[in-house]
Amino acid sequence: MRKFLFRISAFVLAIALVVPLLAEGEESVLNRVKDRGRLICGVHGGLPGFSFLSEDGNWSGFDVDYGRAIAAAVLGSPDKVEFVPLKAPERFPALQTGEIDVLIRNTTWTLTRDTQVGADFAPPTFYDGQGFMLRKDLGVTSLEGLAGASIGVTAGSTTELNLTDTMRALGVEFNPVVVEETDTLYNSYEQGRCDVVTSDKSQLVARRQVLKDPEAHIILDATISKEPLGPVTVHGDNKWNDVVSWVVYATFFAEEHGITKANVGTFETGNPEIKRFLGKTGDTGKQLGLSEDWAHQVVYAVGNYGEIFGRNLTPLGLPRGVNKPWTQGGLLYAMPFR
Amino acid sequence: MSIPFWRDVRVLRVLLQVLFLIGIFLLAGVLYTNMLTGLSNLGLTLNLDFLGNEAGFDISEGIEYEPSETYLKAFWVGVVNTLKVSLIGIVCATILGLVVGIARLSSNWLIRTIAAIYVECFRNIPLLLQILFWYTAVILQLPRVRESISLFEGVFINQRGVYLPSPEPTAGLNVWGGFLLAGLVLAVILYILRAKQLQRLERPGFRAKWALPAFLIVAVLGWFLTPEIPFTLDFPVLRGFNFVGGLSLSPEFSALLIGLSVYTGAFIAEIVRSGIQAVAKGQREAARAVGLSESQTLQLVVLPQAIPIIVPPLTSQYLNLAKNSSLAIAIGFPDVFSIGNTMMLQTGQSIPVFAMIMVSYLIMSLTTSAAMNWYNRWITRNR
């Protein structure tokens, strides 16, 4: 009997020791992407100009181009990427569980998200701010005029919190209409369930284009928040976050130095930093765990920041605003390629 | 020569159970450590401290709440909203199901067919679709706020909800309350007397036959005798963007309530029908033969035998209704799941919040189930 019990307990102990080890096995997302030969990128999916699936089945948009840029840097081709449309509440769980490699979905960088939600942020690719859209014929021009209005907002967004904070500070009473999906939100707005819809101004501009009569709606001048939007990687994977961050810097750098999609192949320069950038000298690729021509691939695939912006957002009527290189008085600032 | 223990069935029986238990504990342990490892890799910890922090988000309807209150309070608002829609939904679905279930057995062809069509349509379409249908295709298609339909003085219907005048109590309410109390005492006495009389006569009958009119007479007399009118009506008025004042039912609440009641009502109708049909035909015929009327047969012979058959499946439908109310998130009604979802996103504490939501539903369901089981035992004993 004693021998039997001993065997049982030895068996139990062995399982208890082995199984937690199986659950471990952490490795960088970078290796996972390389092994798979494909990048999986979480996007919004319903936002013209940022990420939108056209009728012929092609993804296009500002966020989509950043997904392609990362694929080009890591895998050498902008087509080796799969886009997964996510609702706002789904995005962080999808990132935490490894369902997606990188999240590029109008996600605002906040302290709580950086520390509590298991997310790490790459440099913002778009500096946005929260605004309000409503029907022109209501004749409202300021936030104080919104007293008693029904204001539509998406659930679980920073917008929801900013709205509450601002209205509390102004002492303006309002009725929140909290909706989970962006499509439902604008649908409710168009049907008249809410008087006002609030979101990032870029989103309002993009969605106004697809309303029945875009001219009948105005966006108030008031901007109530800072919304730095950028790519997000899972918390604690520094290697992968470095790669994503430097892909973003590469697009900034290319615009600062006038390197474009068209001239990147033939760009002649004596500037040692640009030489390092293009992979002609130095080992920036090796340091990041990429091939030496990674930045070249990025610019060749999607162009520099100005080109990405011009292709996707200028047609919507969005001004560059602060989304200009620092040399022109904007906020885009590439760290040194050294 | 004794039997070796590995062939002793008494030992084996215990041993296998012990092994099975160890297996379950081990599995739970592995899953738990796995979760903790995963969380710590992401730099997250498990604790409930965040519940005391300021929630910061507003909630569109429910009990008194300010965005400056805690997450715990916000969660409680969600719990109350879920309870509200579930309880009202259960009452509506039961009434609807009872009426339709009896209608399905009607001898009138039209009533029978309409009831059958209702049951087959609503039972066979997914609930989520039905709720979205009520919300988008019915309620949001109502006129806009400025073009509200006004049925009576102070009753407005538009796509932002139904607005009714709300009774506001005045000082006269205390006096009238006294009359109501007196009426109630009188009604109880009359009810007992009537019940005793019926028992003595050994005759079935309506026990509240004296109590009900007596109560109504006292209540009406009291209303006129009270010097000040007990209630004044607060009428909703269109001010700025929306109606202010009065009672209002939000479109989200209405759509969810209609969807849940109509869907569950169809199932309850079938349960009621099957319960009634399970009572032997001879019982009904015998009741008619001794001279009971059709409604007396139903009340005194059929229903008392049908109810014990109906109650257990009915309990399951009540539980389903309460759990299905979590579909509220699709149309933005702030129930416990919807608010929990927002909390998860704002704090990143998915696992504790998920656990809280699950425990809330569990408590609600176990309570419902306990109450219904008690009711079932009570009616079976009192037969």
Image: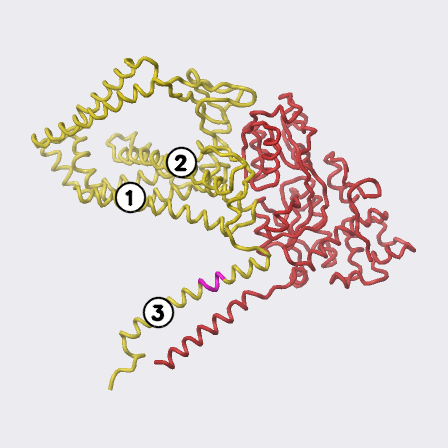
Give the residue at the far left of this rendering. B201
Region in magenta: B28-32
User: Residue flagged by tag 3: what amino acid is it?
Assistant: Val
Residue matched to label 2: B84
Q: Nearer the viewer, residue B112 or B350?
A: B350
Secondary structure beneath dot 2 equals helix
Q: Amino acid at mark 2?
A: Lys
Chain B visual colour: yellow
- Which mark, residue B372? 1
Q: Residue at x 43, y 24 (%)?
A: B247
Image vertical order of residue B3 relative to residue A83, above or below: below
- In which image quadrant can residue B103 be found? top left
Within-10-Å neighbours for mark 3: few <14, some 14–19, many 20+: few
Q: Which chain is red?
A: A
Residues at marks 2 and 3, common chain?
Answer: yes
Question: Is residue B289 one of those drawn in magenta?
Answer: no
In the image, residue B73 lies at what x, y percent? Answer: 48, 40
Q: Which of the two discs, 1 and 3, labels the residue nearer the N terminus?
A: 3
| Mark closer to the chain start, 2 or 1 | 2
For label 3, the SS is helix
Relative depth, front residue between A261 and B3: B3
Label 1 element class: helix
